[in-house]
Image (tube, rainbow, N blue to C red):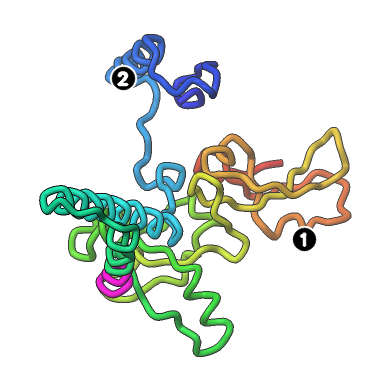
Amino acid sequence: MNRRLNLDIPQNNTFLLPRDILTAADRLIGMKFGMGTLDDMNHVKNKRIRSVANLLQDQFGLALVRLENMVRGTICGAIRHKLIPTPRNLVASTPLTTTYESFFGLQPLSQVLDRTNPLTQIVHGRKLSYLGPGGLTGRTASFRIRDIHPSHYGRICPIDTSEGINVGLIGSLAIHGRIGHWGSIESPFFEISERSKRIRMLFLSPSRDEYYMVATGNSLALNRGIREEQIVPARYRQEFLIRI
């Protein structure tokens, strides 16, 4: 929110302030008169990856709720019949096992791992999908969602996708892409500075790399050792330019 609204509120503040609401309202009024740009819903920075661990965590929370209801029912029944419940009768693993059995057996995204060879096993584990609960369907997804977006560069492979009705909805991570702490897809970049001759690699999230001038991946290897200025294609704010 600080980056979007150009604020400097401390990160440990997790509540909305009057300043936040006023700044957001001012930004919306400015957009009404053609000042500023709207968020691109197809940009990768506006999407988050829900890993298998996140899905299992949600199922574990659901199992705990079912276990709580079962314990409450057991206690109420024991009080009604004037019995003393034992720990064995009070807590059972049935809610946990039934929840996970239902998740792995009925979840639309639950699949058997492809172990034809080590390569297919790695590729299958790096699949991304728009489908599933809370996602899209193959019949309602528009062409803009299926299309390749400039923010996919270095993060989502534009070639490895499904065919037929699910084209563009199921893809794979790029070879060097990784999932960040908050579920964003990070991509490695080589930082080249005029002040320093050292070249270091850093991983950037989709919300950060748009503030940099990003050259093509092979320009560093092709122009290595050349001291004079070179004209190379570059990407800045999702637009491809010519950079000297």
Q: Amino acid at mark 1?
A: Leu
Residue 51 among those drawn in magenta:
no
Residue pictured at 49% horizontal, 54% vertical: 152
Q: Position of residue 125 (x, y in %)?
A: 49, 71
In depth, the one of 9 and 94 nearer the eye is 94
Give the percent coordinates (x, y) of residue 11: 54, 24
Question: Mark 2 or 1 closer to N-term?
Answer: 2
Mark 1 is surrounded, within 10 Å at the Cα level, by few (under 14), some (14 to 19) or many (20 or more) other residues, namely few
In the image, the segment drawn in magenta is 100-107
Q: Most extreme residue toward the bottom, as rendered? A: 116
Q: Nearer the viewer, mark 2 or mark 1?
A: 2
The residue sitting at 26% across, 69% down in the picture is 102
- Residue 239 x %, y %: 51, 43
Label 1 sits on residue: 222
Image position of 21 (left or right of 226)? left
Residue 94 is marked as none
Q: Position of residue 227 (x, y in %)?
A: 88, 47
- Residue drawn where x is 53% and y is 23% of the image: 12
User: In terms of depth relative to the viewer, which is nearer, 180 or 53?
Assistant: 53
Q: Which residue is mark 2?
A: 28
Horizontal placement of 8 versus 57: left or right? right
* Tag 2: amino acid: Leu
